[in-house]
Amino acid sequence: MKLSFNVDGDEFTLAGESSSQVKKVLKQLGVPSEVIRKIAIAMYEAEINMVIHANGGTIDVDITPEKVYIVLKDTGPGIPDIDLAMQEGYSTASEKVRELGFGAGMGLPNMKKYSDGLEITSEVGKGTTVEITVYI
Amino acid sequence: MCEYLHSVTLQEEKCRGCTDCIKRCPTEAIRVRNGKAKIINERCIDCGLCIRVCRNHAKKAVTDTLDSLLEFKYKVAIPAPTLYSQFKDILDVNLILTGLKKLGFDEVYEVARGAEIVTAASRKLLENKTLPKPIISSACPVIIRFIQIRFPELINHILPIISPMEVAAREVKANLVKKGINEKDIGVFFISPCAAKVTNVRNPIGFDQSSVDKVLSIKDVYMKLVPILKTIDRVETLRQSSNNGIGWAISGGEGKFLGIENYIAVDGIENVNKILEKVENGKLKDVDFIEGLACHGGCLGGPLTVENSFVAKNHLEKILRYSVKVKKQDNQDMINSDLNLTWSNPIISKPVMTLDQDMEKAIKKLEELERIYDSLPQIDCGSCGAPNCRALAEDIVRDNANIEDCIFMLRQKVREMAEDMVNLSRKLPPAFRKNDD
């Protein structure tokens, strides 16, 4: 089944709503809890990144009995060096964002850690697409 | 056999079938059917929110009655520390404990003392650092059940230790048996602010058999105790607890006494839900301990209490200050309980939200659910008896409701039928038709 979300970019406090929804759905589907946990963490990090760096975007989720496949698309500034961004502790978040408790440089590493497949394509000035796969 | 699942029940004659309780229930466990609020048994976690929000007082928790004292030869009261906070102007806990003995109990053992033993055991368990962080307190039975239903992946974060009530009951029973009293003759009565404890005693989580025999509500005991307290001329020294154990009744009391600096104390089930969501998202790994209590203000806000929780807190703080003046420090050195306080059974998840055991079928049902939800007005009016449009859609795919239960959908159907009738009434048999028909 497919789910789609529009993520607002200007509302920090609402960030994470889509991942909350997805979690609820996965529980209704009887997905094992350890799988839900992985998806929850990976998707939440990706969603937060989208709000912090790219002023929001869209999320498409495809759920089958075998896997959960999540695509997050934004038209933000893009990531100049993905390998660098993957390093723990590396962050380009503004001081303001850090004051809110985000931007610890663990976003991408956590996405990698908690997903079974992570694909990031990005073009500076155009936007970023993050594809997360978690097998059930 | 029917498993005992919850103590919160409906008094049918008082229920007017409004939407107050269905809308507030944190597990969407209530539906209005035939004009009455019906609880979906396996979803109820006994949080007591419906008891509090019902304007007609139609919800209550079934507890044991004081008559049940007659069932036992040797009667023991184990009062929750919240009891102490209910009486205005009484600062000496010994007076209340003496009152309990006058009420008909042979012995009194404080749950606050049990709390101190639990704290000592918790400290040991926390030292070996095997539990994933943040560790979640197991003190509130509602929260454990909430996690079983809504956050199964957090089950291994729960501190696997029995409750102060259970410790108190086991401890006092063991002591009395040592003194030569037949275990069968002993009745342990928990005096409770909490509806969930009733269920917990009949159907414990983490072990098989509770040592508590009966659960009385603070309300019932309070009514009997007030006149008795006025007649007491000699106060017995019965208090064993220190302030630390009594402090458990207040939200944050457990964490404070544990000596953990880095903890979150959260009360009110909807607030706990938000915090657990954060834990689920991996956001609170830097926190050591979470003390989550379902009632606002902690146990002082329990549904079986008499006094307003804010007033009760003021009373309890007065008692704590008075105790510092007249009495003892923490006597935790004296704790040499040989009881095993850890759980013997694993906590299992209760996937009551799952639409179907077979995931393929569950996906089909969920797609159907989304389709139905899109067609509904999405104003969550509650007239269908479900808390919101989404819950109605869920009930429909579970075959527990019909789309026409929605008054807007029904109206639309009637309208379509009426239009069809008008259109049909215009139709004539071919023999009667004119050219322009």
Image (tube, coloured by chain):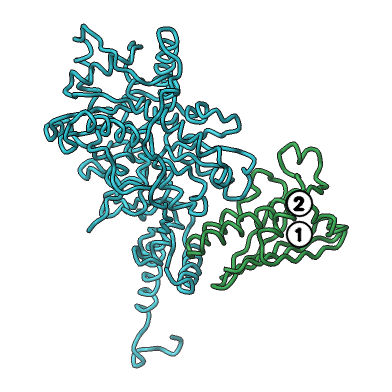
The quarter of the picture where residue B249 lies is: top left
Which of the marked residues, 2 or 1, is nearer the chain's N terminus?
Answer: 2
Amino acid type assigned to the residue bearing label 2 in the image: Asn
Q: Is residue A58 above or below residue B249?
A: below
Q: In the structure shown, which secondary structural element does the residue marked by tag 2 occupy?
A: loop
Residue B375 visible, this angle:
no
Provide the residue designation for mark 2: A55
Mark 2 surroundings: few (<14), some (14-19) or many (≥20) residues within 10 A: some
Q: Secondary structure at mark 1?
A: strand
Are the residues at dot 2 and dot 1 in contact (C-beta closer than 8 Å)?
A: yes
Q: Amino acid at mark 1?
A: Asp
Q: CA distance from mark 2 to mark 1?
A: 8 Å
Quadrant including the C terminus of chain A = bottom right
Give me the residue at 57% from left, 33% from top.
B263
Seen at 65% across and 53% down, the residue is A44
> Residue at image x 27%, y 30%?
B175
Q: Chain of mark 1?
A: A
Expressed as whole percent of the image width and height from the top left, the position of residue B113 reads: 37, 26
Residue B298 position in % (x across, y down) = 43, 31
Q: Which mark is residue B240?
A: none
Q: Is residue B271 left or right of residue B286?
A: left
**What residue sits right under mark 1 in the picture?**
A74
Q: Is residue A123 left or right of residue B324?
A: right
Asked if A102 appears above or below B180 in the picture, the reply is below
Query: Which quarter of the picture shows residue B433?
Result: bottom left
Q: Nearer the viewer, residue B372 or B361?
A: B361
Q: Residue at x 51, y 34 (%)?
A: B123
Residue A54 in the image: state x and y as whole percent. 78, 53
Colour chain A is painted in: green
Q: What chain is the cyan one? A: B
Whether marks 2 and 1 lie on the same chain: yes
